[in-house]
Image (tube, helix red, strand yellow):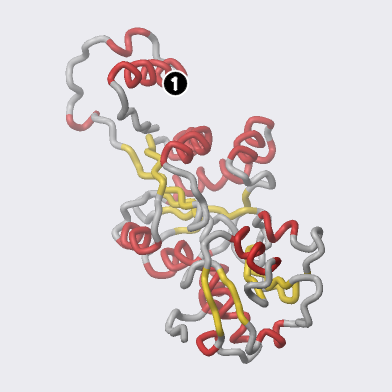
Amino acid sequence: MNFDTQCHPGRRLLRLTLLLLAAGAGPGAFAQKQPAPAAAQDVRLVFAVNEGGAANADAADILFRYQELGEVVEKALRARVSIVNARGRDRLKENLKSHAYALLLARPNDVPAEAVRDFGYEPVVSAKEPYQTIFIVVKNSPLKTISDVKGRTILTPDQYSNMWRAANAMLRDNKIDMGRESVRAMRDQAAIGWSLENGFFDVGVVNSASGVGRSWEKNGGRVIARSRDQINMPMIASPKLSAAQVERLRAAMVSLASTESGQAILKKIGMPAGFKETPRQAFIDFLAWLGDLDIKQP
């Protein structure tokens, strides 16, 4: 795998030495070598990871967290990979459209679904545990169901994010036009919970798998609506990969939960339950439910 070694020259050499030793390279790895023929030069596939807009992980964090998973991916694909931290929805979509990423593992599910539908990407796996988009209120709120949200102040994750789009679909299914409601967006879902607790908004929208989503009811809050189960942390593969490579990778990802070493990898990336195969049609159906993005805030 590829690692960023751009730092102080002395520290860079030490870091590179440690990385090579960890990879099983002996002292001879630093010996002068003749340039390899062009056909034999190292060609790496890009394995992109997107942990969502609320994640604060930088490139170094992503490399550390996904290093062992990258080794599993390399073994399955029989090719070297470079792990990159893919940030920003627009740039992510551009790179998917150009097939710049051989693989994408992403917490936001709508962009990977669009890549499957529109850009020829192939679903590999998704997390075994789905999640829901939930509407939350404080304990003493008069609101009982999603129908009561009409005319109230609503706080959602980033505008046009997958969570925002799911909230829009839920309101639409209950004959509420989100574009006509008082809606504001906030990136940090923990801050959404705090804003409700302090009376700044009537209703919040969060991911059921987030910290605030998991603890809201335990801490006395209420959930007044839950979406359908949604695809969680999908991995998709570029059409540049062969069918055999995708099949090997899918088998390797699904089998992680069956070994101690695999379980350690899953725990490190925050997916302890592991992964499952997810058919292409599930992505298509999900996008059909989400609908388009042609909604204007007041």
Q: Is residue 146 above or below residue 26?
A: below
Q: Position of residue 211 (x, y in %)?
A: 67, 54
Q: Residues within 10 Å of mark 1 (few under 14, many from 20)?
A: few
Asked whether 127 or 13 is in front, the reply is 13
Inspect this view and state whether residue 76 appears: no
Dot 1: element: loop
Looking at the image, residue 106 sits to the left or right of residue 176; the answer is: left
Q: Position of residue 268 (x, y in %)?
A: 60, 38
How far across and down, in percent of the image, does residue 29 sit?
32, 13
- Residue that carries the numbered disc 1 in the rendered image: 23
Seen at 48% across and 33% down, the residue is: 71
What's the residue at 67%, 84% (across, down)? 149
Is residue 75 shown left or right of residue 35?
A: right
Q: Quadrant of the N terminus?
A: top left
Frontmost residue, 139 versus 66: 139
Horizontal side of 58 relative to 6 (left or right) equals right
Q: Amino acid at mark 1?
A: Ala
Of 230 and 163, which appears nearest the observer? 163
- Along the horizontal axis of the image, is 261 left or right of 113? right
Depth check, front residue: 183 or 209: 183
Give the mark count. 1
Q: Residue at x 75, y 71 (%)?
A: 138
Give coordinates of residue 266: x percent, y percent.
Answer: 62, 40
Q: Residue 69, can we see it? A: yes
User: At 35% across and 19% down in the image, what residue appears?
Assistant: 11
Among the 4 quarters of the image, the one containing residue 92: bottom left
